[in-house]
Image (cartoon, helix red, strand yellow):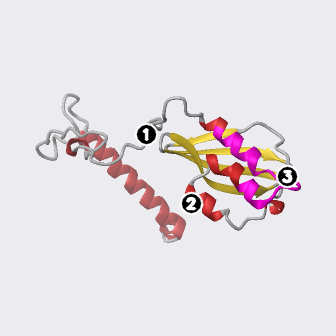
Amino acid sequence: MRTVLRLLGTRYGIALVLVVVVLVVVGLGRTVLDRDEGKSANDGLGPTVAAVPTSADPYASLGDDGVDESANPAPSLSKGAADVSTVATRFAKAWLRKPGISGDQWRAGLKPDASTELMTDLADTDPADVPTDTITGAVQLQSLGSVTVAKFPAQGGTIVLELQAAGGRWLVTSLDWETA
């Protein structure tokens, strides 16, 4: 008997006693609460409250007064206006470095497809500083709602254009060069 008491006094003995106590409490709890098959486990604890129906969106009944970002309406273009791919390709080809062309001639080639803001940004650009003279692949278009991004693989990098529909036609609003 003394050996059993000495064993129970160690941390292993205390752990064993706690495990036995937990098992007894869980076993008694299941026996008492599950004795009637037709009743719920909560019946022994008091009255049951009916569940309140909920929806996946708790604010669905309030309506939506925000912008629907899931629908990207097509931009309004004039009849006969060039599509985004045509405008982007025409602008990218006009932007390429061409030896012997003046700055004014170069900008005149860009102007029909560029926004006023972009032309202002390009006012002091020297066409000799354009980093490429060759487009090496087909345009890749990505529609982002009211903006379309056009990427042209070129010798030494990628030409990145942003286009927006304005005044019934597509205009290039931004120009970027990504070095390869």
Mark 3, residue position = 98
Residue under the image location 54 percent in, 65 percent down: 12
Q: Is residue 79 above or below residue 137?
A: above
Q: Which residue is mark 1?
A: 70
| Residue 41 horizontal side relative to residue 116, left or right | left
Q: CA distance from mark 3 to mark 2?
A: 23 Å
Quickly name the residue at label 2.
117
Circle 3/circle 2 CB separation < 8 Å = no
Which residues lie in the magenta part?
Answer: 87-107
Residue 3 visible here? no
The kind of secondary structure element at disc 2 is helix
Q: Considering the image in quadrants, where does the C terminus appear?
A: bottom right
> Residue placed at 61% from the left, 51% from the top?
114
Identify which amino acid the numbered label 2 is placed on: Glu
Residue ID at (61%, 58%): 118
Q: Residue at x 80, y 59 (%)?
A: 102
| Tag in front: 1 or 2 | 2
